[in-house]
Image (cartoon, rainbow, N blue to C red):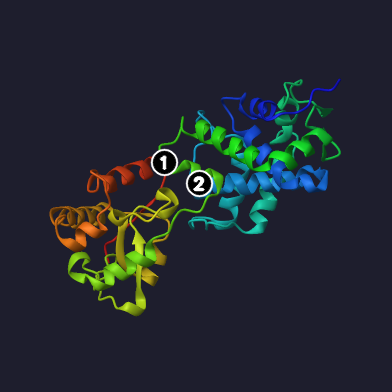
Amino acid sequence: MTERLSLEHFDRAISNNRTLSYKMALAKALLKHESKGKVALLDIAETVAKTYYRHAIFFRFRESPSIEEPVAIQAVRCATSSYYGEEIPPKKPAQSVIEKAAEKMTEPQGFFRFVLSAWSGGPEEAQEGSNMYFSYSRPEGWLEYSSGFLDLIQEHRSILNALITLRWVEFLEKFNDAPRLVGKVGGIPPSRRTTNFRELFLNFPELFTSDTCWLCGKPLDQDTFTLDHVVPFSFQYGDDLWNLVPAHKHCNSAKGDRLGDMALIKRVRQRNEQLLERREDAIVRKIMEPDDQFVAALEEAHHKAQRAGYRTWNSEP
């Protein structure tokens, strides 16, 4: 009698490799393609490439304890560098970047070299095979879901996704010191507060020096007013008062996904210290976040983002 797949089986399958995230990446992709029943490996590779672009390029996660990155991430990084050069890549990559990375992943030495056969403890580097979840052929470039795996997905999709997120976060925590990993890995949009903070900054310019752009030093009016994340949003993944400064829209865009330099950090720290000193004022008490580390949080986040590889923007005009 064939053993029925369970959540426990799935959890063991994705979490029994402590040096690579390939099984979690494959699992995440498989949950997106099950409606096809039989899917091209190239299609799976494109989904994996999108995930690793988000992780390694946008969020700058390390996905391995080794200095040398896994070949799948090398493929994504190479395709990204080839397309964008020295520019900071956007949150959503060009489709040609994903296609180029996916093609590289499907090569004999690529992403599928071990992960398919190792999924259920099969022989290393098998060209074709089957397990309780799927059958596959690397030479012919396809993977076909088992009926039991399809049933498991249909019955427990949300739990399977949650398991992937949980195990991937546990894996990443060993090599990364970034906040809000669950939201980043799980694709859970953060709660945004910039609209409320924008009104606050505009209504109380004496508290926030919000009539001047903190990036260029020139006057700022309501039509061009935005709030910049001193430590990039892609790292902090939230709108924290201690991390926001008024800026022209074009200055904000020019700074992009880069860290504020130490001159800006120093100014923002002084602003935060002044807010902390006025904690008993009614307006400050209303907006002050209940965090004893309100002042220290900025520099701590700045140091962590530097270690993660974020580049610095120069605030000098």
Relative to 48, residue 277 above or below: below
Mark 2 crowd level (few <14, some 14–19, many ≥20, 10 Å Cα): many
What residue type is disc 1 on? Ala
Q: Answer whether labels 1 and 2 touch (C-beta < 8 Å).
A: yes
Residue pointed to by mark 2: 184
Res. 179 visible in picture: yes
Q: Position of residue 288 (x, y in %)?
A: 24, 55
Left or right placement of residue 45 versus residue 171 in this view? right
Relative to 11, residue 192 above or below: below
Q: Quadrant of the C terminus?
A: bottom left
Relative to 316, residue 190 above or below: above
In the image, 109 versus 194, the foreground residue is 194
Relative to 133, residue 219 above or below: below
Left or right placement of residue 127 versus residue 290 in this view? right
Q: How far is the residue under mark 1 from the one under mark 2?
A: 10 Å
What residue type is disc 2 on? Lys
Left or right placement of residue 6 versus residue 316 in this view? right
In the image, 201 versus 57, the foreground residue is 201
* Number of marks in picture: 2
Residue at x-position 28% and y-position 75%: 220
Q: Position of residue 312 (x, y in %)?
A: 35, 52
Residue at x-position 50% and y-position 46%: 184
Residue at x-position 84% and y-position 23%: 2
Could you say which quadrant of the image residue 151 lies in? top right
SS at badge 2: helix
Question: Which of the numbered marks, if any, corresponds to residue 278?
Answer: none
Res. 146 visible in picture: no
SS at badge 1: loop
Residue pointed to by mark 1: 178
Mark 1 crowd level (few <14, some 14–19, many ≥20, 10 Å Cα): many
Q: Position of residue 208 (x, y in %)?
A: 22, 65
Q: Earlier in the sequence, mark 1 or mark 2?
A: 1
